[in-house]
Image (cartoon, grey):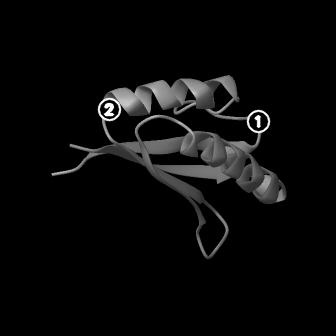
Amino acid sequence: MSFGFVAFHYPAPEHLEEFVRECHKVAEASRRQPGFLSVGVWVTPDGEAVVTTGAYESEEAFRAASEVAREMGATPDGLSDLEVRPREVHFLVSR
């Protein structure tokens, strides 16, 4: 069973491009982690949200990879200095 997530981030309009760049840095680091399957960085057409997605072979692989992201300053909860409201994270299990 694969384990994944979808996260909605709400950066301030003036920080949108910076936030997207940071997401791509974390995505690149994720690609090098054991158990990695996929990652995506999306922006809604209105530019109000950045949506990140990821999939791993297992929850354990995701948890290990998330430690690397945490070291880079990306956390699955909370609010970064670039965001105007807390992100919404949804975890997924393939069936």
Farthest bottom residue in view = 45
Q: Residue at x 52, y 36 (%)?
A: 33
Specify few, some or many for label 2: CA neighbours under 10 Å numbering under 14, 14-19, or 20 or more: some
Type of residue at label 1?
Answer: Asp
The quarter of the picture where residue 47 lies is bottom right
Farthest right residue in view = 14
Across and down, in percent, residue 37 comes to 41, 50
Q: Relative to 27, is 33 above or below?
A: above
**Disc ID at residue 59:** 2
Q: Residue at x 50, y 31 (%)?
A: 65
- Residue beneath disc 1: 81
Specify few, some or many for label 1: CA neighbours under 10 Å numbering under 14, 14-19, or 20 or more: few
Q: Residue at x 40, y 38 (%)?
A: 35
Quadrant including the N terminus: top left
**Disc ID at residue 90:** none
Judge left or right: residue 50 versus residue 36.
right
SS at circle 1 = loop
Tell me which numbered mark, 1 or 2, is placed earlier along the sequence. 2
SS at circle 2 = helix
Across and down, in percent, residue 40 comes to 53, 58
Q: Nearer the viewer, residue 45 or 72?
A: 72
Mark in front: 1 vs 2: 2
Farthest left residue in view = 95
Across and down, in percent, residue 21 comes to 76, 53
Q: Residue at x 76, y 57 (%)?
A: 16
Q: Nearer the viewer, residue 50 or 53?
A: 53
Q: Relative to 84, is 50 above or below?
A: below
Across and down, in percent, residue 42 comes to 58, 64
Q: Nearer the viewer, residue 38 or 48?
A: 38
Q: CA distance from mark 1 to mark 2?
A: 28 Å
Type of residue at label 2?
Answer: Glu
